[in-house]
Amino acid sequence: MSMPELAGRADRAPSPAVDRALTVLERLVAADEELTLTALAKSTRIPLATCASIVYTLERRGYAARRVVGRSHFWRPTLRLYGLASQLVRKVDLSSMAQRELRALADELNMPVHIGVLDGASVVYVAKAATAGFIQFDTYPGKVSPFNLTALGRAIAAFLPEGEIEALLPRLVPGRGPSAGDSSPEAFSKLLEDVRARGYAVEDQEEQAEVACVAAPFFDADGRVAGSVGVTGFARDLAKKRRKAAAGVVRVAADVSRRLGCLSTALPPAKVVS
């Protein structure tokens, strides 16, 4: 069996040994207390001898430590993992990590493409790929908008934990555009259900006249929504390209998710409709 065929099989990891080692490491990190080798092997469903080889290797590399009490050994992870994560965080910059993809989509649609993150009840634009032209939209890195009036903010809000959504509902801002609708928590909750069902969000002349946007969420390594990718354009132009724009933001958002360590199986389904 070729490597591409093996990698494509959902029922088997390309490297079972690595898969088991990562399972043990993740279990150690997730545990609320130190684990004995027996408990670790049982909870991971890995044979005791194999589990022992893994934890002793992790200990040798500095990723695990043990405390000996009588004949029992209690295992825990070390902060070496934190050191690795810190290095990665310094390298991950949302404003530049997908700039090539943002630029390609902006050129394809002839519309600006953005990355946004949630800050309280606001969405903050952290990256932009603009198109050449006389007319430029007032969207720029650092711009702040009410989260509920932009597709960027809606795409994020739809996938927040329930408690975080409830905390945001009292902070909804009424739209000033000609298509602004009901700004009640009940109406917004229904809107978010539609976003979750599609996998992306739409805003059409609700924040301001003649402007519309489409956005899709991206997720971090823990499967938590981390931000969104969106396209902004004149409502009349975006209406003609909405299907292509939706497919584009879903694609780029999935790329960003994978770069942040999110498994593809954790991504929400996207139903691109006209």
Image (spheres, rainbow, N blue to C red):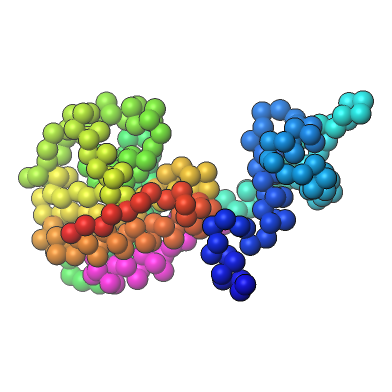
Q: Say whether residue 70 is magenta.
A: no
Q: Is residue 176 above or below residue 273?
A: above
Horizontal side of residue 63 vs 86, given as left or right: right
- Residue 7 shows in this picture: yes
- Residue 90 shows in this picture: no
Q: Residue at x 51, y 58 (%)?
A: 259
Q: Residue at x 22, y 28 (%)?
A: 185
Horizontal side of residue 274 vs 47, given as left or right: left
Q: Residue at x 69, y 41 (%)?
A: 45
State which quarter of the image contains the N terminus.
bottom right
Residue most extreme to the left: 178
Task: Choose between 250 and 99: the one closer to the eye.
Answer: 250
State which quarter of the image contains the C terminus.
bottom left
Q: Say whether residue 109 is magenta.
A: yes
Q: Position of residue 133 (x, y in %)?
A: 21, 71
Q: Position of residue 207 (x, y in %)?
A: 17, 45
Horizontal side of residue 265 vs 230, given as left or right: right
Q: Position of residue 246 (x, y in %)?
A: 27, 59
Which image quarter: residue 118? top left
**Span highlighted in magenta in the image:** 91-111
